Amino acid sequence: MDKIIAVIESSSIGTSKLLLDGLLAGGYTPLFLSRDPGRFPFYGNPAIRFIETNTNDEAGMLRELNEFNRNSANKILGVTSAYDYYMPAVAFLADALGLPGQKPEAARYARHKHNQKEAFAAKGLPLPAFQICRSAADVEDAALNIGFPVVCKPVSGAGSMGVKKFDNMPELLAHAVDWLRQATNYRGIPIEQMLLLEKFVSAPEISVEVFNGRALALTDKYITPPPIFLETGHQVPAKLAQEWYAAAMELAERAVAALDLSFGCCHVEMHVLGDGFSLIEVNQRIAGDLIPLLVREAFGIDMIDAVIKSTIGAPIDIHAAPSTSVSRIGFLLAGEVDEKSRSALETVSGIPNVVECYLAKDLPTQVEFGDPRDRVGYVVVSAPSASDCEIALRSALKALTLKDEFFALPDNKAKAA
């Protein structure tokens, strides 16, 4: 008997690949829905079934899944995805098929950043001053009210796309006008023509990995210097003073509860301030950027397995636990490596404490987008201590780039333990 789980879209690397690999390793048959399944390297894998369909059309996907159930002896047991964009669709489809999932209304509401900000404010949760903007005039008014510097972001984006810091009105308005013209993102997914303007917070960032409303792990986030906010690495557990851990985990749980996201994984981002935290946003899905791999290496917590089991309503035993090691991922950005770097991959794989390394097929020479499309490779390390992690990562990056400075190893100014 095939155990069928529908998966909406994917990528060839990262957490999406971890999810597909986890399904296959667990004896499940992924039913893969995509607008263009042929573009994936796993297309044609006999262990995966494929449906080519418009993944922006929830009603169309439901028709496809109902037809599959009518014509198959093995019915669909669950629906999932690793992408923010498709979480409302996942919730809608699971509900329509009578399967476990997030409440559809909560998933749809939480997909938009302005809704999140309003929900957090209503609950008195800490967050920077913000204003919702539907026009360039709104943006100008918001900037005058909030005061520069400000951060401008699309309300329904993901992966820091369109997120940028501004110190003056002309550049802010040019950016705003450009984004307010866009009806879809680069994936062809419809986006709301609205922007969120908020006060820029100069502070380190962490994320909290949450499952079924309970915090499991804290992750340090490393980003490029403003004006863009391109994530260049993560470390688990976060280098946070122990007395701050409970407060960060409690705030993450309160943020998730404010959005009524009680099912499955959430990835909660926040700034670390001198006297507490400031919420950024909640992503209602399992963490990207291979953070589940880092969590498994550091804590022994298998978030991929938890996602799969929750999708089909199977019992799950997952809870916060002390870390047994430190794990980290460092991303290589366009321009840091070239084709000659591929010859160093075998050497890097043999460096002590290196878990995994990867270079993309194409290696552009400069950062162009200011979002994950500019990342061209990564190195994952795991070691007994944070210093051992950094030594291994630095050695690997140096071998790949033949340089001594890397975006993935910035100064860490978080509340160190």
Image (cartoon, helix red, strand yellow):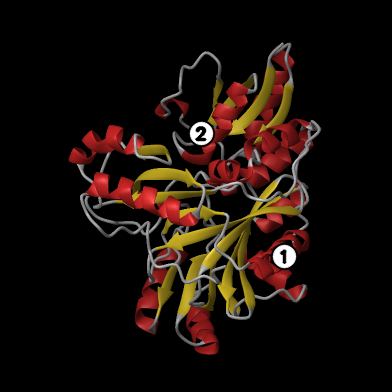
**Nearer to the camera, 45 or 60:** 45
Left or right placement of residue 223 versus residue 384 in this view: left
Q: Is residue 249 above or below residue 49?
A: below
CA distance separating discs 2 and 1: 31 Å
User: In front here: 57 or 149?
Assistant: 149
Q: Residues within 10 Å of mark 1 (few under 14, many from 20)?
A: few
Indicate the secondary structure of the residue bearing disc 2.
helix
Residue drawn where x is 61% and y is 46% of the image: 324
Q: What amino acid type should be assigned to the residue bearing mark 2?
A: Lys
Horizontal and vertical percent position of residue 62? 68, 32
- Image position, residue 121 (x, y; %): 71, 75
Query: Residue 348 is drawn in which quadrant?
Result: top left
Check disc 2 and report the residue beneath it: 17
Q: Quadrant of the N terminus?
A: top right
Residue 174 at least partly seen: yes
Which mark, by number, is residue 246? 1
Q: Residue at x 58, y 33 (%)?
A: 19
The mark tally for this picture is: 2
Query: What amino acid type is highlighted by mark number 1?
Result: Ala
